[in-house]
Image (cartoon, rainbow, N blue to C red):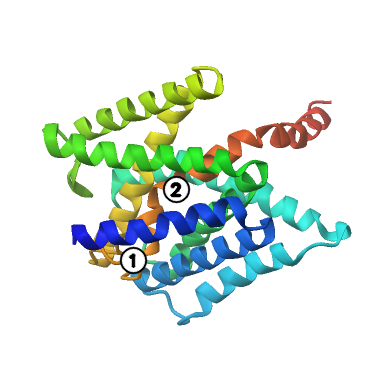
Amino acid sequence: MLKARILTSLVLIPLFLAALFYLPEVYWALLMLVIITIGAWEWTSMNRLGGGQLYPAVTFVIGLLAVAVTDTSYVFIQQHLLFWGLLASAIFWTFFVPIWLSGRFRIRNQMGMAVIGWVILIPTWLAFVSLHRIKPGLLLALMVAVWIADSAAYFAGKRFGRHKLAPQISPGKTWEGVLGAWLAVSIYGLILCSALGITPWIILGLWGITVLSIMGDLLESLVKRHAEVKDSGRLLPGHGGVLDRIDGLTSSLPLAAFFIYFPLYYHYAYPLWASVSQ
């Protein structure tokens, strides 16, 4: 298993980096859309959603329509999808997911799980595309933070873990692992600050990303536990499925994009609030 995991990583990482830095924006968006569509197919399988391949097909079409909009008269479609998609993700992960994780309740309504899948997956795709548009290096830095947090949490938990974080959801996760993740991303943040000459306050943001990535991991673990499956899929040898690899990104990247684009929400909401207050 470990050998397969390492070999898969050795193949995927160079391919991913090449795509990240050399693919034109539209092809990057399409590549990420394919990955998200595979995630939608895994979500369909795990939650036994009806309609066969209709759900991932609809997911793909939503993204494809957004990518296909090139006429400036219709560019508002992309803007609204980004605006409302990131906002929905922020509300979902900030308010709904903590309640879901604490209650560990099972949502049996298929339409409800379908909507939740879209709230998880489509904003993740929007984050991949919008952060890449700002700067590929920014997207990579955020993803590396999530990967470092995940690895540090695993090894710290393995070595020092005593106090379970959420034993009824994911028995292997511990509070010591969380502290190890925070320590690792703090060191990573200090390296970034030193290398790029940016403010150390970025470390607070990395701590937030760490918490969000753990929430994403826990949520997928809860869904898999309800579905009685070990992995979301078998596409990646040693890694499971696509959702197994991007679970920490589904919660952290959309929220990071939301805060980067937050001035847009202020400029949109302020005129509305001013008109109401008058």
**Residue 236: image tag:** 1
The answer, for residue 227, to whether it is visible in the render is yes
Residue 170, given in percent of the width and then of the height, sits at 21, 49
Q: Residue at x 34, y 51 (%)?
A: 219
Quadrant assignment, res 199? top right
Residue type for callout 1: Leu
Q: Residue at x 33, y 48 (%)?
A: 217
Q: Quadrant of the N terminus?
A: bottom left
Residue 45 in the image: above or below residue 5: below
Residue 237, given in percent of the width and then of the height, sits at 29, 67
Disc 1 or 2, which lies upstream in sequence?
A: 1
Residue type for callout 2: Leu
Q: In the image, is 59 to the left or to the right of 46?
A: right
Q: Residue at x 38, y 35 (%)?
A: 210
Residue 167 in the image: above or below residue 116: above
Q: Secondary structure at mark 2?
A: helix
Which residue reaches farthest right?
73
**Residue 83: image tag:** none
Q: Secondary structure at mark 1?
A: loop
Q: In the image, is 128 to the left or to the right of 206?
A: right
Residue 202, given in percent of the width and then of the height, sits at 50, 23
Q: In the image, is 175 to the left or to the right of 27?
A: left
Labels 1 and 2 touching (C-beta < 8 A):
no
Quadrant assignment, res 27? bottom right
> Distance from label 1 to label 2 (Cα)?
17 Å
Residue 36, given in percent of the width and then of the height, sits at 50, 63
The answer, for residue 91, to whether it is visible in the render is no
Q: Residue tagged by mark 2? A: 249
Q: Residues within 10 Å of mark 2 (few under 14, many from 20)?
A: many
